């Protein structure tokens, strides 16, 4: 009888030990990249936020589960700044598959290009404007006239003065905008967000963050006042076309374009 009692006591003791979580602080769980991204979003952190996140395995089951503690770390000492007890909905959100944003941007680009190729007019005009940490002159809208797929004229607004020759690369056709977006995707930019026109498919708003670890290198563009110009031709008198080339004035700073009936260079300012 004593032996049976001792055996039962030993079994109960072992069972109690097995059911009791180990003493000491909870251990951190290892999260994969998708879980990390979803957790940061759940906790309201942007991709560029300097704070880090982690999860404490409160029930010591070595997997993410309700009751575990999500923690935000930050500051010089990378110390805890806040914590949150996860519920089952949080766990489901963290474990959800995360789509590749660049893959989605590439899909949208393909669809938009297909629409543009189907509806692209031979001649059109539109206004392109950049937003950047740069001089005001570089943020002015550029009115662009496209004739048979080539830029015929680019003018700074509201003055209507020709775009300086050294800035000629800033004037883009719609196809040039598409190339800009595709290059950003191919080079694995940190983020590529684009809105497209519902009818023609051309980009209306472009936001590209090339490297989230660098500041002031983002590209922001808006395309507006798009107009199909049936039979649009370069500004001309009779059949004489004025080309877009420019001439430097004696001051070494000012450039003038061609104009007038004979497409002569305008006079340099005195």
Image (tube, rainbow, N blue to C red):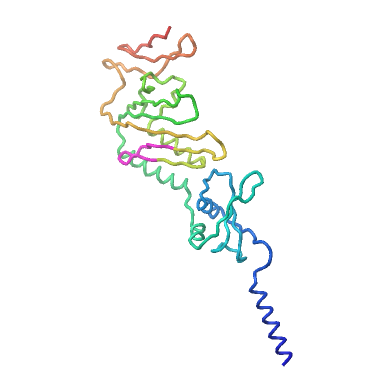
State whether residue 37 is above or below residue 268.
below
Of residue 205 and residue 233, the one placed in the foreground of this image is 205
Would residue 25 be found to the left or right of residue 257 on screen? right
Let me know if residue 52 is in the magenta part.
no
> At 74% across and 91% down in the image, what residue appears?
2
Let me know if residue 203 is in the magenta part.
yes
Residue occupying the far right of the picture:
2
Image spot of residue 249 (x, y percent): 45, 10
Instruction: Please give the range of residues in magenta.
Output: 195-206
Q: Quadrant of the N terminus?
A: bottom right
State whether residue 240 is above or below residue 139.
above
Image spot of residue 146 (x, y percent): 34, 27
The part of the image, by quadrant, that contains residue 27 is: bottom right
State whether residue 107 is above or below residue 226.
below
Image spot of residue 170 (x, y percent): 44, 27
Q: Quadrant of the C terminus?
A: top left
The part of the image, by quadrant, that contains residue 71 is: bottom right
Residue occupying the far front of the picture:
82
């Amino acid at each position: 009888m004593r032996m049976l009692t001792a055996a039962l006591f030993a079994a109960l003791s072992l069972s109690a030990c097995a059911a009791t979580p180990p003493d000491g602080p909870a251990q951190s769980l290892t999260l994969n990249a998708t879980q990390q991204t979803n957790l940061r979003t759940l906790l309201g952190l942007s991709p560029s936020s300097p704070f880090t996140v982690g999860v404490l395995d409160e029930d010591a089951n070595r997997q993410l589960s309700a009751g575990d503690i999500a923690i935000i770390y930050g500051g010089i000492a990378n110390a805890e700044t806040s914590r949150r007890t996860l519920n089952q909905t949080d766990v489901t959100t963290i474990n959800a598959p995360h789509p590749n944003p660049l893959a989605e941007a590439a899909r949208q680009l393909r669809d938009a290009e297909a629409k543009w190729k189907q509806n692209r007019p031979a001649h059109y005009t539109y206004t392109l404007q950049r937003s950047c940490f740069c001089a005001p002159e570089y943020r002015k809208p550029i009115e662009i006239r496209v004739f048979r797929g080539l830029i015929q004229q680019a003018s700074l607004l509201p003055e209507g003065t020709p775009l300086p020759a050294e800035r000629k690369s800033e004037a883009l056709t719609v196809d040039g905008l598409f190339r800009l977006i595709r290059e950003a995707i191919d080079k694995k930019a940190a983020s590529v967000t684009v809105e497209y026109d519902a009818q023609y498919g051309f980009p209306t708003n472009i936001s590209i963050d090339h490297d989230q670890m660098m500041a002031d290198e983002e590209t922001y563009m808006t395309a507006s006042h798009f107009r199909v110009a049936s039979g649009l031709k370069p500004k001309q008198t009779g059949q004489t076309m004025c080309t877009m080339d420019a001439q430097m004035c004696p001051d070494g700073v000012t450039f003038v374009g061609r104009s007038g009936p004979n497409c002569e260079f305008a006079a340099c300012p005195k």
